[in-house]
Image (spheres, rainbow, N blue to C red):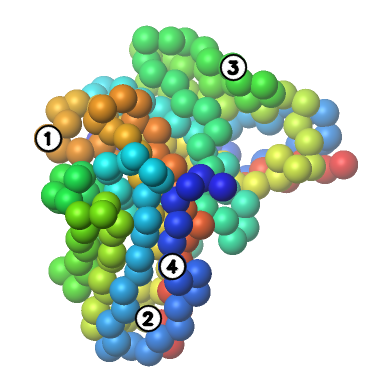
Amino acid sequence: DSGVTQTPKHLITATGQRVTLRCSPRSGDLSVYWYQQSLDQGLQFLIQYYNGEERAKGNILERFSAQQFPDLHSELNLSSLELGDSALYFCASSVAPTSGYAQFFGPGTRLTVL
Amino acid sequence: QQQVKQSPQSLIVQKGGISIINCAYENTAFDYFPWYQQFPGKGPALLIAIRPDVSEKKEGRFTISFNKSAKQFSLHIMDSQPGDSATYFCAATTRAPWEYGNKLVFGAGTILRVKS
């Protein structure tokens, strides 16, 4: 158990809908990262937050957005969903940049868009 | 230049054998190289990591070998066991400048099967 929690575990929805994925980092970690894992694209970085502020952005679609709240939990919002958005979405956290750069992953949310 | 190339795509090893997975990178700014293990339906779990000022790091049966000049690093699993059967990902990141964050760039993954 990495200490990172994600909810829900599974999500099934229809095209055009909007969903919210939630992540709670390990205690004390200020950095939160979101990654997407799909069969054709592998593990891809989406976005990083540090202490409530966006720090880095990957190839995140404009239909996707995220935020980190004062209690450090993070939410990833996916809107106007398409079939191709079906994937595993992982959240990771780390103590970076204070010390060490190891990222610890949560169990993921499996999103299925029908 | 941001890619990390991983090979082989899949690997079958006998129980007790050595599993070797290789990765190569182009971006010389990468300075932290972790390996992750992922079981079906689970999140990637950090196995072991290395920084480029060290050529080898060992933790139990897992060893990372790092060749800075060749821009390659590899994972060796000694005395491989059926319980090691999983997908292994190498990754890389830069720790500076912090202003740009420290995203992980992942290899494509290697599916390891250890036969008993």
Is A54 or B33 nearer to us in this picture? A54
Residue B80 to residue A48: above or below: above
Q: CA distance from mark 3 to mark 2?
A: 43 Å
Chain of the residue that carries numbered disc 3 in the rendered image = B
Q: Amino acid at mark 3?
A: Lys
Which of the two discs, 1 and 2, sits closer to the camera? 1
Residue A82 to residue B53: above or below: below
Neighbours of disc 4 within 10 Å: few (<14), some (14-19), many (20+): some
Left or right of B9 on screen, residue B72? left
Measured from the top left, where is residue B42 in percent x and y? 57, 56
Instruction: Tell me the number on the disc at residue B11.
Output: none
Q: CA distance from mark 1 to mark 4?
A: 29 Å
According to the picture, the residue beneath numbered tag 3 turns out to be B58
Left or right of A65 on screen, residue A94? right
Q: Mark 2: which secondary structure?
A: helix
Left or right of B29 on screen, residue B22? right
- Mark 2 or mark 4, earlier in chain: 4
According to the picture, the residue beneath numbered tag 2 turns out to be A83
According to the picture, the residue beneath numbered tag 4 turns out to be A7
Measured from the top left, where is residue A60 in percent x and y? 22, 61
Chain of the residue that carries numbered disc 2 in the rendered image = A
The answer to whether marks 1 and 3 mark residues whose Cβ atoms lie closer than 8 Å is: no
Chain of the residue that carries numbered disc 4 in the rendered image = A
Q: Mark 3: which secondary structure?
A: strand
Residue B113 to residue B51: above or below: below
According to the picture, the residue beneath numbered tag 1 turns out to be B99
The answer to whether marks 1 and 2 mark residues whose Cβ atoms lie closer than 8 Å is: no
